[in-house]
Image (cartoon, rainbow, N blue to C red):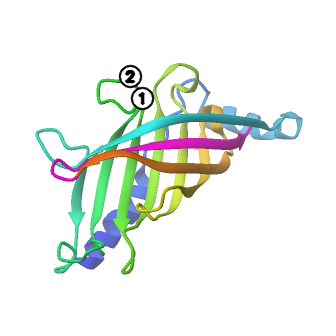
């Protein structure tokens, strides 16, 4: 089971969707963009959104795909792996406008504190960033007031992105496994 879970995680990372509808993505256009890169000016973009993660109910947005025999007895859920397709919203309320999706995996990776390895693509669908994405990778110790997760790449208007996503908890319901976190993102890109 463990080997299957590792294979599945690697498969998801390799096959994750990269959206860049507003930017030509055919090989010739991408090559031309890279050839022009020395003439492009690096930009700094700052924005925030709310990450809505729902683990139960009729329409969960995060589901368990692997766990050890002891994951659910562990105070940190060590070994639990989830696949997510969570809404990114403009506000912390469930009715607020969706501006994208957080698609990928996260896994409980700590024996001593509740924390997760986050491997997600933030795929934007709203206005200026429609069709663009940011990729994050890092450890998220969820009981800390503020956490930093690395932005390791991007597509569309965020090509060659690098930066930091600062995360904080807004509210959660343990019974429904509905969690809302605020992401403040600062990225450099071309």
Residue 187 highlighted magenta (yes or no): yes
Which dot marks residue 124? none
Q: Say whether residue 47 is left or right of residue 172.
A: right
For image coordinates 57% across by 23% down, the residue present is 22
Q: Residues within 10 Å of mark 1 (few under 14, many from 20)?
A: some
What residue range appears in magenta? 174-190
Secondary structure found at label 2:
loop
Q: Can residue 179 be seen in this view?
A: no
Residue closest to the eye, 141 or 36: 141
What residue is shown with label 1? Answer: 91
Callout in the foreground (1, 2): 1
Farthest-out residue, top: 127
Q: Position of residue 37 (x, y in %)?
A: 81, 39
Sequence order check: which comes first, mark 1 or mark 2?
1
Residue closest to the eye, 82 or 72: 72
For image coordinates 61% across by 27% down, the residue present is 23
């Amino acid at each position: 089971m463990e080997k299957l879970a590792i294979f599945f995680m690697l498969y998801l990372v390799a096959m994750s969707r990269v959206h860049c509808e507003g930017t030509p993505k055919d090989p010739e256009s991408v090559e031309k963009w890279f050839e022009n890169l020395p003439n492009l000016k690096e930009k700094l973009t700052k924005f925030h959104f709310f990450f809505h993660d729902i683990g139960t109910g009729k329409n969960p947005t995060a589901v368990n795909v692997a766990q050890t025999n002891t994951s659910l007895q562990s105070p940190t859920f060590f070994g639990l792996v989830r696949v997510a397709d969570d809404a990114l919203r403009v506000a912390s309320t469930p009715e607020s406008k969706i501006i994208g999706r957080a698609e990928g995996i996260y896994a409980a990776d700590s024996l001593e504190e509740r924390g997760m390895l986050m491997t997600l693509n933030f795929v934007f669908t709203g206005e200026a960033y429609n069709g663009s994405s940011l990729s994050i990778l890092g450890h998220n110790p969820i009981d800390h007031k503020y956490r930093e997760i690395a932005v390791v790449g991007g597509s569309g208007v965020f090509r060659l992105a690098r930066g930091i996503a600062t995360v904080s908890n807004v509210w959660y319901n343990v019974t429904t496994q509905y969690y809302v976190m605020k992401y403040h993102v600062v990225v450099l890109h071309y």
